[in-house]
Image (cartoon, rainbow, N blue to C red):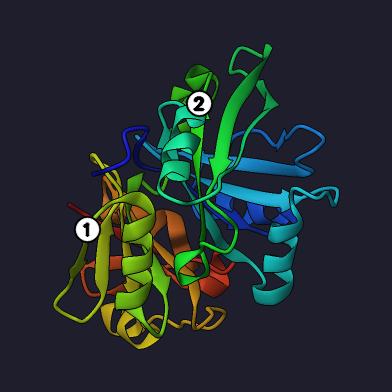
């Protein structure tokens, strides 16, 4: 039975080494970024968000080493930049944590934190969250999962931040590389009480819930065959590899991406080396 307090993928976290440099790179790719946020002191991190509907991307960087961000720092040391974890939307983080505890997984949290937000009219408000994480060791395909309850959605989903020159609208799929797609997908399915489904090319998908993006586990070879002509340098054999983004206008996407764009079949793709360790594939639906 699916978790009652989890309603699908909320956002993808891309760990970066230099937060401001990464933000400037994503601006050159046609994304509109939020002003830089600084999280509560115990988090020791800062971020820029790239808002879609109903989900978003987060560029996350460590500002001060803390106990809380030790796993994120270890990720950067091992893998460099890229997709480090995926958040689900939590209806209620406290109840969600108890749901996974009842299934035998000891949650980390719930943890409350916030970051200041400069609103479009110049006033300063706050974005407030309550999150919980599955145990750090439970990371299918090397990607950690957690759930995020938004206490102040109005300070996160700001209409002015949801319009992008590259026409990105939402996340369609999160692609995770692994030598063992079936095993890793079954692991995630067990963690979130969802079904794993084999795809024609041998990849295995897991729905995240509702109208939200799917997880797809696949080998690097399978990823290369999905996006022929796209260099995969910088991706690990096991770990977060790509985000498939729905575009409202692929011609606008290609124009905004400029020299970073690679046409691959029906998709316009940014290789991982041009997007801080994350392949970005824009598709029309």
| Residue 34 placement: quadrant | top right
Q: Where 219 sits versus 61, above or below? A: below
Q: Which mark is residue 71?
A: none
For the point 55% across and 20% down, the residue is 155
> Residue 171: x percent and y percent?
35, 49
Q: Where 133 sits versus 270, above or below? A: above
- Mark 2 highlights which residue? 150
First in sequence, mark 1 or 2: give its number: 2
> Residue 119: x percent and y percent?
61, 18
Depth check: give the residue in front, 2 or 114: 2
For the point 31% across and 33% down, the residue is 4
Q: Quick one: quadrant of the N terminus?
A: top left
- Mark 1 highlights which residue? 195
| Disc 1 to disc 2, C-alpha distance | 26 Å
Q: Where 278 sits versus 40, above or below? A: below
Q: Where 226 sits versus 32, above or below? A: below
Task: Answer few, some or many: residues within 10 Å of disc 2's Cα (few below 14, many 20 plus, some between 14 and 19).
Answer: many
């Amino acid at each position: 039975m699916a978790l009652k307090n989890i309603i699908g993928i909320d956002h993808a976290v891309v760990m970066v080494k230099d937060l401001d440099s990464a933000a400037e790179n994503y601006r050159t790719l046609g994304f509109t970024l939020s002003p830089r946020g600084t999280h509560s002191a115990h988090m020791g991190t800062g971020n820029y968000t790239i808002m879609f509907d109903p989900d978003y991307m987060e560029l996350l960087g460590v500002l001060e080493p803390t106990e809380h961000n030790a796993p994120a720092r270890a990720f950067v040391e091992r893998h460099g930049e890229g997709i480090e974890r995926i958040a689900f939307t939590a209806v209620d983080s406290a109840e969600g944590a108890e749901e996974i505890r009842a299934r035998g997984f000891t949650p980390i949290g719930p943890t409350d934190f916030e970051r200041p937000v400069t609103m479009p009219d110049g006033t300063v408000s706050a974005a407030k969250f309550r999150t919980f994480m599955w145990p750090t060791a439970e990371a299918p395909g090397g990607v950690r999962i957690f759930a995020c309850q938004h206490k102040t959605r109005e300070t996160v989903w700001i209409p002015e931040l949801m319009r992008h020159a590259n026409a990105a609208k939402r996340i369609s799929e999160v692609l995770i590389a692994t030598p063992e797609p079936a095993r890793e997908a079954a692991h995630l399915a067990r963690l979130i009480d969802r079904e794993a489904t084999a795809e024609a090319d041998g990849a295995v998908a897991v729905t995240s819930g509702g109208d939200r993006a799917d997880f797809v586990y696949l080998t690097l070879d399978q990823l290369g065959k999905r996006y022929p002509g796209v260099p995969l340098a910088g991706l690990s054999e096991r770990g977060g590899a790509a985000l498939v983004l729905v575009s409202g206008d692929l011609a606008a996407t290609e124009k905004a991406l400029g020299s970073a764009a690679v046409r691959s079949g029906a998709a316009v793709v940014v290789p991982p080396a041009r997007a801080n360790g994350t392949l970005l594939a824009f598709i029309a639906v």
